[in-house]
Image (tube, helix red, strand yellow):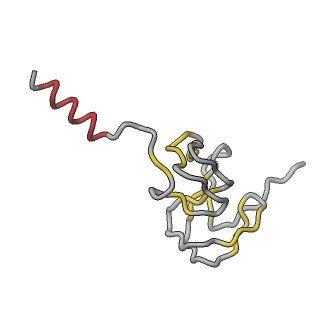
């Protein structure tokens, strides 16, 4: 029987395909965690509910949460790094653009 790599109990992978995990408790900078069997020292404060890289990500790589892509890395992201708007972007069309298009169509 094979064991899955150890991940700290303050982190949650929502799907086995995910390359980011979710902090289920605030994690202060300097904390040492186990993420997928790797020992990582967290470099910045991680607020409750925020994403943490579960592996190294390269620029333009898909960020996978819930087993699906939620966006892509805008730069290289290291294992254990906070993943948020400063280093990832949504790959989806902003909803305000769709709303503008709908309002223009209804005026015709």
Looking at the image, residue 72 lies above or below residue 101: below
Residue 43, given in percent of the width and then of the height, sits at 61, 72
In the picture, the quarter occupied by the C terminus is top left
Looking at the image, residue 99 lies above or below residue 41: above
Determine whether, in the image, residue 43 is placed left or right of residue 50. right
For image coordinates 53% across by 69% down, the residue present is: 46
Residue 50, given in percent of the width and then of the height, sits at 51, 62
For image coordinates 78% across by 60% down, the residue present is: 37
Residue 77, given in percent of the width and then of the height, sits at 61, 56
Residue 35, given in percent of the width and then of the height, sits at 71, 62
Determine whether, in the image, residue 91 is placed left or right of residue 62. left
Q: Which of 2 and 107 is in front in this view?
A: 107
Q: Nearer the viewer, residue 93 or 66?
A: 93
Looking at the image, residue 102 lies above or below residue 41: above
For image coordinates 58% across by 47% down, the residue present is: 59
For image coordinates 68% across by 45% down, the residue present is: 16
């Amino acid at each position: 029987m094979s064991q899955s790599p150890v991940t700290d109990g303050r982190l949650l992978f929502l799907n086995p395909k995910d390359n980011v995990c979710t902090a289920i408790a605030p994690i202060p900078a300097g904390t040492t965690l186990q993420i997928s069997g790797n020992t990582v020292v967290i470099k910045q404060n991680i607020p409750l509910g925020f994403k943490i890289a579960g592996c190294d990500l390269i620029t333009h790589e898909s960020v996978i949460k819930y087993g699906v892509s939620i966006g892509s890395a805008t730069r290289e992201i290291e294992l254990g790094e906070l993943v948020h708007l400063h280093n990832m972007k949504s790959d989806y069309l902003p909803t305000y653009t769709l709303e503008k298009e709908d309002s223009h169509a209804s005026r015709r």
